[in-house]
Amino acid sequence: MAYDVNLAGMTLKNAIVTAAGPWAGSAEGIQRCIDAGAAAVITETICLEERQRISPRLFMKGQQLFNTMLYSNLHLEDWERVLDQIDRKDAKIICSIWGTSASEMAYLGKKLENMGADALEISLSAPIGSRNKLISYHSPDTEEFIRALVDTVDIPVIAKLSYESASSPDFLKELENAGVTAFSAIDALKGLLGVDLENKRVLMPTYGGYTGPNIRPVSLAMTAMLRQYSQLPVISSGGVHHFEHVLEFLMLGATAVQLASAIQLNGYNIISSIINDVESWMVSRDYDCIDDIRGVALASLRPFEDIVPSSLTAKIIDPCRKLDCALCQQSCLKGAIARNDEGTIIVDASRCDGCGLCVERCPDKIIKLCWR
Ligand SMILES: Cc1cc2nc3c(=O)[nH]c(=O)nc-3n(C[C@H](O)[C@H](O)[C@H](O)COP(=O)(O)O)c2cc1C
């Protein structure tokens, strides 16, 4: 059984990478990611100057995590000490970087390569702060900006994409032309926690990075789209909190999958749990290697225009025992679902147009879509 994957010429011992963030912002944090079994650790984003932390900077509502953290609070020279201290074992170190000019990016990249980085990830479009949008999205300068880095270093350069930049085939082409060898996608979305209605104030002081399980559907779509738009490998990021999420991304063509808020919220042990659970699942299904599952779900993803309209209607396949449940009725705006005098749920097929929402919402799964 082989779990290793090839990422832009690097061999990773498994498909789990820890994403850029404060869990990998110090020697201790990086070491804990490595010790937990991560195949690669992406550092918190390193700039020429260290950044002060604001407080508070992490906000939550339910499972939704928002952060207002931009870049590492360590100076470039401190990073030399950090990278020296860690015992890398068989993990790769990918340094996340950001610079404000082509020459700064090249300088930073070369320095980190000399400090032992195995690869670089450019944090192209962090959702926090006022980033140079010309570089983050579309610009004639993008190619020059990235190329300055690519031409200066001899290690792979990965572009970390926002949702917006991952959705733009033209921008992806520019990045490819400039020489990036893989994409990380997606970065956090830009989000606001909410508004305190009584005090008429926002619940966080500035726009933040919105992360966690709720962004996974967006990230899954971006992984699939990147596979369709580009030949470059994708390291998926966004809402991965469980081993099944990792498998979903792999089946949509990801080369490797990143853990971020899962570590922030559950601690470093989640890394080894997810790695073990992915491996157990592979064994239980008799898969020999990650390549056996990579991209296998993509063939079932079709363009909307190719889907032939079909004539389905909801049917009750088992008696409903939840007499106080009205989810199916509430969500049927056509009024096709009702309870008769005996309390039995019935579907009026002449009103039902097969949208499928009652099937999705039924807690006992007693409704099915069938041919008329
Ligand atoms: C607290 C926090 C800090 C982060 N810092 C960085 C960073 O320094 N650089 C970066 O590229 N992404 C950063 N991210 C984004 C993550 O790497 C990841 O792309 C994002 O959280 C989406 O994944 P998730 O939904 O699994 O958390 C940060 C995310 C969080 C939650």
Image (spheres, helix red, strand yellow):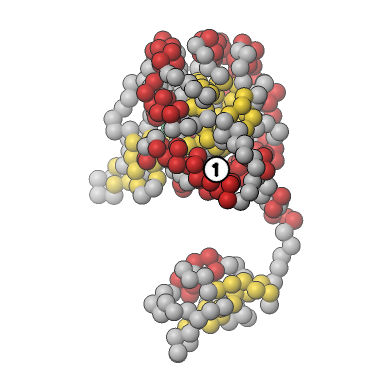
Q: Is residue 183 left or right of residue 302?
A: left
Q: On the rendered image, what quadrant is the C terminus found in?
A: bottom right
Q: Position of residue 253 (x, y in %)?
A: 65, 41
> Which quarter is ligand 1 in?
top left
Tell me the element at label 1: helix
Mark 1 Cα within 10 Å, few/some/many (few <14, many 20+)?
many
The residue at 67%/39% (across/down) is: 291
- In the figure, 127 relative to 308: above or below? above
- Placement of 158 over or under 155, stated as above or below: below
* Residue in front for this viewpoint, 145 or 261: 261
Position of the N terminus, as image quadrant, is: top right
The residue carrying mark 1 is 279
Residue 151 placement: quadrant: top right
Q: Residue at x 42, y 77 (%)?
A: 322
- Image quadrant in which you'd find residue 175: top right
User: Which residue appears at 42% of the width and 18% of the height?
Assistant: 86
Rendered view: 48 above or below 139: above
Note whether ligand 1 is within 8 Å of mark 1. no
Q: Does residue 225 show up?
A: no
Picture coordinates of residue 140, whole percent (x, y): 65, 22
Classify residue 58 as left or right of residue 80. left
Based on the displayed image, in which of its 4 quarters is residue 222 positioned?
top right
Give the percent coordinates (x, y) of residue 173: 69, 29
Looking at numbered disc 1 in the image, what kind of residue is underneath it? Glu
Q: Position of residue 279 (x, y in %)?
A: 54, 43
